């Protein structure tokens, strides 16, 4: 019995040594952001935005202003955006993360703000146009969102936010433009 345990231990040690040697011989560099991640680069920086918010479930509507600061998170895979703004309902602060999800082959957005809103969306890019779609609950109702951003130049972008309760009939929640500082 002792000989069998010793043999098993020796075999197990040999297997572990071989596996360790194989892993050590592999290249062990930290992963680097790929070309999909680099497509987010135009969003990096400080932005000043103006929007026209339409009356609806998001508030009374009116002019809104915002300032966004988007910086690369350690490792360079995600952009972290912090924003402050003012609108018909007062001051607002928010944070969001933008990144590439290689498993799903889409861009991801996750954000929250000082009004209690939290949202997620998936995005695609075609040329200078970015299309984001999401579904989140508000007041117990599922709300579908479409957010379209067009990079009109390296320092300007326009955006349109549309919402729907059924995913078929859409109404504009806000439209505006941002300029890079």
Image (cartoon, helix red, strand yellow):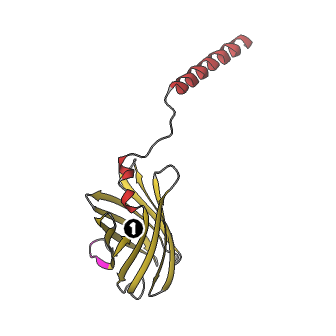
Residue 176 left/right relative to 84: left
Would you say residue 144 is visible in this rendering?
no
Pinpoint residue 98: horizontal percent, then vertical percent. 43, 59
- Look at 36% across and 87% down and name the residue there: 55
Check the image and report above or below for 103 versus 72: above
Q: Judge whether residue 170 is colored magenta.
A: yes
Under tag 1, what secondary structure? strand
Q: Main secondary structure of the magenta part?
A: loop
- Look at 53% across and 27% down and name the residue there: 23
Q: Name the residue under label 1.
A: 135
- Look at 52% across and 24% down and name the residue there: 25
Check the image and report above or below for 88 versus 84: below
Quarter of the rendering occupied by the N terminus: top right
Check the image and report above or below for 128 versus 87: above
Magenta highlight range: 168-172
Extreme residue in the right direction: 2
- Look at 50% across and 72% down and name the residue there: 94
Pinpoint residue 130: horizontal percent, then vertical percent. 31, 62
Nearer-the-camera pick, 2 or 26: 26
Q: Residue 18's quadrant in the figure?
A: top right
Quarter of the rendering occupied by the C terminus: bottom left
Pinpoint residue 151: horizontal percent, then vertical percent. 30, 65
Nearer-the-camera pick, 20 or 137: 20
Would you say residue 51 is visible in this rendering?
yes
């Amino acid at each position: 019995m002792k000989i069998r345990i010793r043999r098993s231990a020796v075999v197990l040690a040999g297997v572990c040594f071989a596996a360790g040697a194989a892993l050590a011989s592999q290249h062990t560099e930290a992963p680097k952001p790929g070309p999909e991640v680099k497509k987010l680069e135009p969003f990096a920086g400080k932005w000043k935005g103006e929007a026209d918010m339409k009356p609806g479930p998001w508030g009374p509507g009116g002019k809104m202003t915002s300032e966004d600061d988007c910086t690369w998170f350690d490792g360079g895979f995600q952009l972290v955006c912090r924003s402050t703004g003012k609108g018909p309902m007062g001051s607002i602060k928010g944070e969001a993360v933008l990144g590439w999800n290689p498993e799903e082959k889409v861009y991801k957005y996750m954000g929250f703000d000082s009004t209690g809103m939290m949202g997620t969306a998936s995005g695609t890019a075609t040329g200078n146009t970015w299309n984001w779609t999401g579904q989140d609950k508000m007041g117990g109702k599922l709300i579908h969102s479409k957010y379209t951003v067009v990079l009109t130049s390296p320092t300007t972008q326009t955006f349109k936010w549309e919402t729907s309760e059924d995913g078929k009939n859409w109404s504009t929640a806000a439209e505006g433009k941002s300029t890079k500082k």
